[in-house]
Image: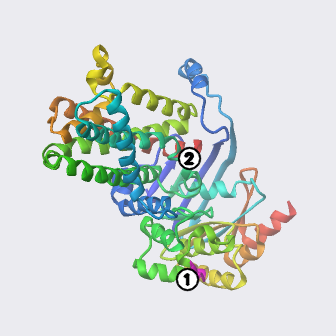
């Protein structure tokens, strides 16, 4: 075998995506993701402070409105509940909501360079991670100022649910991105599914408010991810059964997604 | 020098022209697919039973009308697309320069674009500082390297991209249309860069309509028509064949 790689019709090139794209190119996709963040706020005076500020403002406003609506007795605790729920939901929903354009936005590069599509998937994930860390950092400072024991809860219980959130923010958007390239219908399905998930998930209200229909929240994977982060921050502890189930789903999801990315890398270029 | 680094054997490439599919249509056609009654996809045959061999250090011009298959051939050997039929064996890193597009966005500077390319490339054997300096010198951008790419003219973009792509070591360069939008000064620098590249036994695949460029840099010409190779030989003979047929 003379060549480094060989292509036959109907077969795929044998490359190690994890080694070749994820690890070897980590500086490149992280750099392009940070450049995207800078570009997004290039003309703004406050820059990326807007990420945290907008989440904080929304949380305050929704905390007041929903606090009055549900006649809550402790407005500060309710604000913390809403702020944490909304921050995690926004991060997860934004990453999924933008996913149909993940490959489309890079179609010129996909069609004219030999950059693996996984590079763009990881760049998108890194971009979302930067946004999450900034909004989460801002909100965490605000809620710790109100309730200092939250800092200890994060250190003791928060890390595993946050890892779950970060992993889910990789494979769900990438899977939606690949599906959107293959099937145009996903451009319509993704926002609809997100809207339904949000309306049926107790993000802005408590789970008890659902009454006998609490099972709807239990089967909502996105809500379970958010709730495990929020519960751990609020000191309700970690439901090990749910957390490890989420871990398992995330592992399977990530491995499947990486496999799909590699298998359909030519298909993505062709369909995009 | 005589070692073949690109071996294309009886390769055909079908390109889809219908984009993404409709979920409803796909679901309705599922029984047909399961019974192997074929798929109803609109494709064009961009390459048709192409075979050729490129040796290390060869300078090959791809000649032909628009849509003849030159760019598809470059994409094929660059690993961007795969063959629908046949076999392609590549024994080197092929660096494609096919589109005037940067990895970073339009509001980012030329320096950021160059840094992103440096981090992404496997073949650049110099430090980031040296690389940026070399790119700035060759492109002639000067202080404009720190300005947003959005404000660059087409010529500036073209110069920056060519400089980014050709700085550092490359085993094989797949160049589409070359560097036609640069000014005379840049053209001379770019020629010098390509001479240096060729003297290091770099392999060049150049798809161009410019006979001057093709004669200047290539020794072999492959003429494409309707996705087929219709001539493969000395570059002057290939140009003559292209005009006569």
User: Where residue B152 sits in the image (x, y, percent)?
Assistant: 63, 72
Quadrant of the rendered image containing residue A225: top left
Q: Nearer the viewer, residue A62 or A171?
A: A62
Judge depth for marks 2 and 1 and give the one in front: 1
Q: Secondary structure at mark 2?
A: helix
| Lateral position of residue B236 relative to residue B167, left or right | right
The answer to whether residue B142 is magenta is yes
- Residue B220 vs A107, above or below: the answer is below
Same subunit: marks 2 and 1: no
The answer to whether residue A254 is magenta is no
Q: Residues within 10 Å of mark 1 (few under 14, many from 20)?
A: few
Q: Nearer the viewer, residue B171 or B223?
A: B171
- Residue A140 vs B17, above or below: the answer is below
Quadrant of the rendered image containing residue B75: bottom right
Mark 2 belongs to chain: A
The magenta stretch is B137-144
- Please say which color scheme the image uses: rainbow
Identify the residue under disc 2.
A104
Identify the residue under disc 1.
B143
| Lateral position of residue B69 relative to residue A42, left or right | right
Mark 1 belongs to chain: B
Q: Nearer the viewer, residue B27 or B55?
A: B27
- Residue at 21 percent across and 36 percent down: it is A231
| Lateral position of residue A102 relative to residue B11, left or right | left
User: Where residue B155 sits in the image (x, y, percent)?
Assistant: 68, 73
Residue A258 appearing in the image: no
Residue B178 appearing in the image: yes
């Amino acid at each position: 075998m003379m060549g480094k790689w060989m292509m036959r019709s109907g077969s795929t090139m044998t490359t190690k995506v994890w080694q070749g794209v994820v690890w070897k190119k980590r500086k490149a996709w992280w750099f392009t993701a940070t450049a995207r963040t800078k570009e997004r706020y290039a003309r703004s005076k406050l820059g990326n402070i807007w990420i945290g500020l907008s989440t904080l403002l929304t949380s305050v406003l929704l905390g007041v409105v929903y606090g009055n609506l549900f006649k809550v007795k402790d407005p500060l605790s309710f604000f913390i509940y809403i702020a944490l729920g909304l921050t995690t939901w926004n991060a997860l929903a934004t990453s999924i909501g933008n996913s149909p354009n993940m490959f489309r936005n890079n179609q010129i590069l996909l069609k004219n360079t030999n950059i693996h599509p996984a590079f763009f998937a990881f760049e998108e994930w890194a971009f979302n991670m930067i946004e999450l860390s900034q909004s989460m950092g801002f909100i965490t400072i605000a809620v710790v100022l109100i309730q200092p024991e939250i800092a200890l809860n994060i250190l003791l219980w928060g890390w595993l649910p946050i890892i779950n959130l970060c992993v889910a923010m990789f494979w769900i958007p990438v899977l939606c991105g690949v599906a959107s390239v293959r099937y145009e219908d996903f451009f319509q399905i993704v926002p609809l599914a997100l809207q339904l998930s949000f309306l049926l998930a107790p993000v802005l209200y408590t789970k008890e408010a659902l009454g006998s229909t609490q099972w709807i929240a239990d089967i909502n994977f996105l809500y379970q991810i958010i709730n495990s982060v929020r519960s751990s921050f609020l000191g309700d502890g970690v439901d090990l059964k749910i957390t490890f189930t989420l871990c398992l789903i995330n592992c399977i999801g990530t491995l499947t997604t990486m496999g799909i990315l590699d298998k359909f890398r030519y298909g993505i270029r062709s369909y995009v | 020098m005589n070692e073949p680094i690109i071996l294309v054997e009886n390769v055909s490439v079908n390109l889809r022209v219908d984009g993404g599919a409709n979920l409803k249509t796909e679901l309705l056609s599922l029984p047909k697919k399961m019974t192997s009654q074929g798929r109803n996809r609109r494709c064009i045959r961009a390459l048709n039973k192409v075979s050729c061999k490129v040796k290390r250090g060869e300078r090959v011009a791809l000649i032909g009308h628009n849509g003849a298959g030159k760019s598809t051939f470059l994409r094929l050997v660059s690993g961007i697309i795969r063959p629908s039929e046949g076999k392609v064996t590549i024994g080197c890193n092929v660096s494609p320069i096919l589109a005037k597009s940067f990895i970073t966005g339009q509001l980012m500077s030329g320096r950021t674009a160059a840094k992103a390319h440096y981090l992404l490339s496997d073949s650049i054997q110099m430090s980031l500082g040296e690389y940026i300096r070399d790119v700035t010198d060759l492109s002639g951008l000067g202080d404009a390297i720190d300005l947003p790419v959005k404000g660059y003219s087409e010529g500036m973009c073209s110069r920056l991209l060519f400089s980014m792509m050709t700085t550092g070591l490359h085993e094989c360069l797949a160049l589409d249309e070359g560097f036609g939008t640069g000014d005379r000064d840049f053209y001379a620098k770019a020629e010098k860069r390509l001479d240096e590249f060729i003297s290091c036994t770099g392999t060049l695949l150049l798809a161009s309509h410019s006979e001057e460029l093709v004669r200047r840099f290539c020794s072999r010409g492959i003429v494409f028509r309707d996705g087929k190779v219709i001539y493969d030989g000395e570059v002057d003979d290939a140009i003559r064949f292209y005009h006569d047929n």
